[in-house]
Image: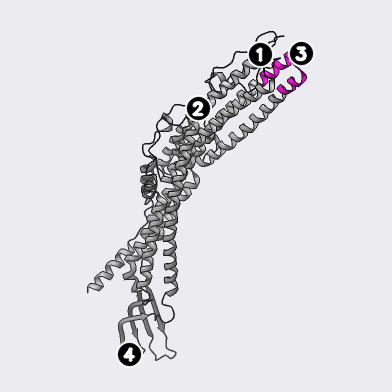
Amino acid sequence: MRLLTFACALLFAGGCASIQKERGHAEVATLVEERIGRKTRWNQGTPEDAEVSRHLDGLLKGALTSDHAVEVALLNNPALQSTYEDLGISQADMVQAGLLTNPSFDASIGFPLTNDGVSETEFSLVQGFVELFTLPLRKRVAQEQFIADTLRVAHEALATAAEARKVFSEVQARQQLVELRRMVLQAAEAAAELATLQHGAGNITDLELATEQAASEEARLELAREELTLVEDRERLNRLLGLWGPRTEWAISEKLPAPPSEEATLERLESLAIRQRLDIDAARKQSELLWNALELARSTRFFGRVDVGLHTHRDANGPRLFGPTLTLELPIFDQRQALIARLEAQHRQGERRLAELSINARSEVRAARARLLTLRGVAERYQRVVLPLREKVVEQSQLQYNAMQIGLYALLDAKQSQVEAYRAFIETVRDYWMARAELEQLVGGSLPGATSRQSTPSDTSPPASERPPEATPPGSSPPSPMPPTEPPSGNGHPPAHGHGATP
C-alpha cells in the first residue's frame, strides 16, 4: 500500500512540472549586482523592456561614463542577451529530467474468419517502474546542472562588464591622443608658416625650411592614423554596447582620470578570487553533479528497463482474463559499464579542470596585481619626475638654441622627446585602468575598498601650455620658454629662426 501511494505521488509530481521563464535571471542579476553594483536584465520585449530602452537612450544622450558603459553593456549587449537564453535551455532540461515517461497502451482485436466465431480482444497498460525510484536523483542532477549554468551566465555578464570598462578606457585615452596630435599639427603648421616667412627674409636655410615643412606633413599623417584608431576603438565599444544607428553618436566628455590617490586593498586577493569567482563555483558544481550522475548510473546498472502494467484478455470461447504484467530487461550484455566508465572519466576530468582553474586563477591574480602596481608606479613617476624633466630639457634647449649654443636638430629632438613622454604617460594611465578592470574580473568582482574612477580628478589632459604658438612675424623675438612643470607645448618643434637672430 505504501509503495502504491509513493508511486502515485511521484506520478502526480512528475505530471505537474512546468517552465518558469524568469527562473535563473533573478539569480544572475543578484550575483552580478553583489560583485560590481550593476544589474542585468533579460530582454523579452515587454513594456518594462521598453522602459529600459528609454533609460538607455537617456544614458547615451549625456556624457558617457565608464559606469554608464558597463550598465549599457549588461542591458543591451546582443551576445550577452543570447547567453541569457542558455538559462531557458537549461531549465527545459531540468524540467524534462523531472518528467516520467508516458505509459504505453496496447490493444488488439482478433476477428473470426467464420460466421460462428467470436471476436478476441486484448488490452494492456504499461508504465516504466525503475524511473519512479530514480526520479529524485535525476532531478537533483538536473538542478545542479541548472545552478552551474546560472553561474556560468553570471560569469559571462561580469566578463562583458570588464571588457566594456577596458575598451572605454581605450577610447578615453585615444581621444586625448587625438587631441595631442591635433595640437601637434597646429603647432607644426604654425612653425612651417613662420619658417616660410623667415626663409623669405633670408634668416634660415633651405634645409631648415624643408625640415619644418616635412615635420608639418608628418604631424598630419600621425593625426590621421590616430583618428582612424579612435574610430576603430569607438566601433569596438559600439559592438560591446550593442549600439547602432543614432545611438552610436554618444560622446565622452571626461578625460582619462589619473590613478586614485589611495589604491584599493590588494592583499589576500587570491583567497578572494577562489571564494567569489563564479567560473570556479560553476566548475565545482559541475564536478558535484557528475558525481551524482555516476552514483545514479551505478545504482541502476543491474536494473535496466522494468515495465509493470495491467493486461486484460478474452479468448474467442473463454472468459475475460485480467491481471498484472511485468517486463524485465536482463542485464546480460549491457550492464552500463561503458556509461559508468565514461562518467568516471568525466568526473576525474572535472576535478582536474577545477584544480587547473584554481591554480591559474591564483597565478593570474598575482600577475595582474603586479602589473597594476607597476603601472601605477610608472604613471606616478612620469607625472612627478619624467614630464617635469622633459619640460626642463626643452626649456634649457630653447635658451641654448636662442644663444646659438646648440643647433636646430638638438632642439627638435628635445621637443620630440617631450611629446613622446607625454604620449607614453597617457598610454600608461590607460593601461593602468585596463589592468584594474582585468584584476577586478580575475577576482570576480570589485576590489576591496575600490574608489570609483568617476570621483577621481583628471590629471592627464593637456594644459594650456599645450596650445600651439602663434606665428612670430619677422623682426619679433621668439616666444618665452614654458614653465618646467607643464606637459609639452605644440608639436615638439621650435619656432624656426636662425639661432635666436632676429631678421
| Tag 3: amino acid | Gly
Is residue 10 in sight in this rendering?
Answer: yes
Q: Residues within 10 Å of mark 1 (few under 14, many from 20)?
A: few
Main secondary-structure element of the magenta-colored stretch: helix
Residue 503, quarter of picture: top right
Name the mark on residue 227. none
Badge 4 or badge 3: first in the primary sequence: 3
Relative image position of residue 74 (x, y in whole percent): 44, 42
Residue beneath label 2, please? 383
Q: Nearer the viewer, mark 3 or mark 1?
A: 1
What's the distance in space between the residues labelled 3 and 1, CA to CA?
A: 23 Å
Q: Secondary structure at mark 1?
A: loop
Residue beneath label 4, please? 318
Residue beneath label 3, please? 200
Badge 3 or badge 1: first in the primary sequence: 3
Name the mark on residue 403. 1
